[in-house]
Amino acid sequence: MAGTRESEIKAASASASSEPPTRVMMGVNESTIRGYPHASISSKGAFEWTLNKIIRNNFSGFKLLFLHVQVPDEDGFDEVDSIYASPEDFRRLKRRDRIRGHDLLEYFVKRCHEIGVACEAWIKRGDPKEVICHEVTRVQPDLLVVGSRGLGPFQRVFVGTVSEFCAKHAECPVVTIKRSAEETPQDPVDD
Amino acid sequence: MAGTRESEIKAASASASSEPPTRVMMGVNESTIRGYPHASISSKGAFEWTLNKIIRNNFSGFKLLFLHVQVPDEDGFDEVDSIYASPEDFRRLKRRDRIRGHDLLEYFVKRCHEIGVACEAWIKRGDPKEVICHEVTRVQPDLLVVGSRGLGPFQRVFVGTVSEFCAKHAECPVVTIKRSAEETPQDPVDD
């Protein structure tokens, strides 16, 4: 019995170091207050929590997968001053949107690179909550971390919450990191 | 700018090793199939997931806090054959119940001790979902991990789910570990 336990422990220690890193997916978006390319308060909070509380100094044990979902404008125009007259304009618009997303992701990728945590980052377009769950099914991370503004039930009715939907529908364990009270802006819908 | 980043990284590394361990609270209960003192399938699953995916080989970086909530029988009797006639009988009953809980917790504490992860374990009586949330407020862990049978909406109406309640009401980040399909017993309400 004691022998079995010892071999179990050895197997556990060996597998922990030789096993592939724990893959943590994070949905990140841009700030509604500070403007592009700043990350939202809740995205940053979720990222810092993952670094401080989960990864800690085990830099090689984890891989972060950053997903930014861009919400397409209903009419396809991001700037009211711009005039689009040809398919080429729309192609350019799409290219520019992709570059926008890249600037946002750069913040997270740079931090990971500096700390020494492996990461990947990519952009998708669509409804954030649905795209995140779809990407979880496709990529199969070990954990999904999403930031949340921590809105009350009244505010949630109007703005919807991505985190709540993901916690219910994503096919992997999900942890929601609520924004701290000190960091909540005057209008809590802002982020 | 580069200097600031470098000092940030150094600060991050230093704080990760000198900071107190990440305190992970786990709600654990006994198996409905294998009987006492075996831990439920979902409790074990949540524990193994935490070891393999979060703690990995960073044994000193985490402290596990095991909470077992005993549900008191409505009439105060656990065994129909027993006769209780005095306050002393009830005191003895309560002492015996506490010993029951200790046997269950022993499984988790032993595993932690063998692996080298610091832990604490304790027992409370009451409604599991409410007691867990109350203990989270009192103990303030960094993360609460709860196992879930992964029941469908129809089954949930009748048995209620502790994990769903905690994910909504606990004052800390919560991760729910669903029981894998291979481990689900014939009657999924069993655990």
Image (tube, coloured by chain):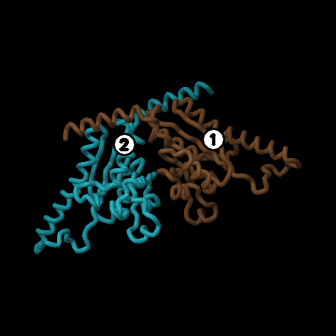
Chain colours: A cyan, B brown
* Residue at position x 84%, y 44% in the image: B88
> What residue type is disc 2 on?
Leu
Q: Is residue B81 left or right of residue A139?
A: right
The Cα–Cα distance between marks 2 and 1, rounded to whole angstroms, is 29 Å
Q: Which residue position holds label 1?
A: B122
**Observer-nearest residue: B79 or A7?**
B79
Asked whether residue A68 is in view, the answer is: yes
Q: Is residue B93 left or right of residue A96?
A: right
Q: Is residue A126 left or right of residue A154?
A: left
Image mark for residue A51? 2
Quadrant of image for the N terminus of chain A = top right
- Residue B73: percent from the left, percent from the top? 75, 54
- Residue A178: percent from the left, percent from the top? 42, 55
Q: Is residue B12 left or right of residue B64?
A: left
**Observer-nearest residue: A69 or B94?**
B94
How crowded pointer 2 is (Cα within 10 Å; few <14, some 14-19, many 20+) is rated as many
- Residue A33: percent from the left, percent from the top? 28, 61
**Observer-nearest residue: A159 or B181?**
A159
**Looking at the image, which residue sits at the far top?**
A3
- Residue A30: percent from the left, percent from the top? 28, 58
Marks 2/1 in contact by CB < 8 Å: the verdict is no
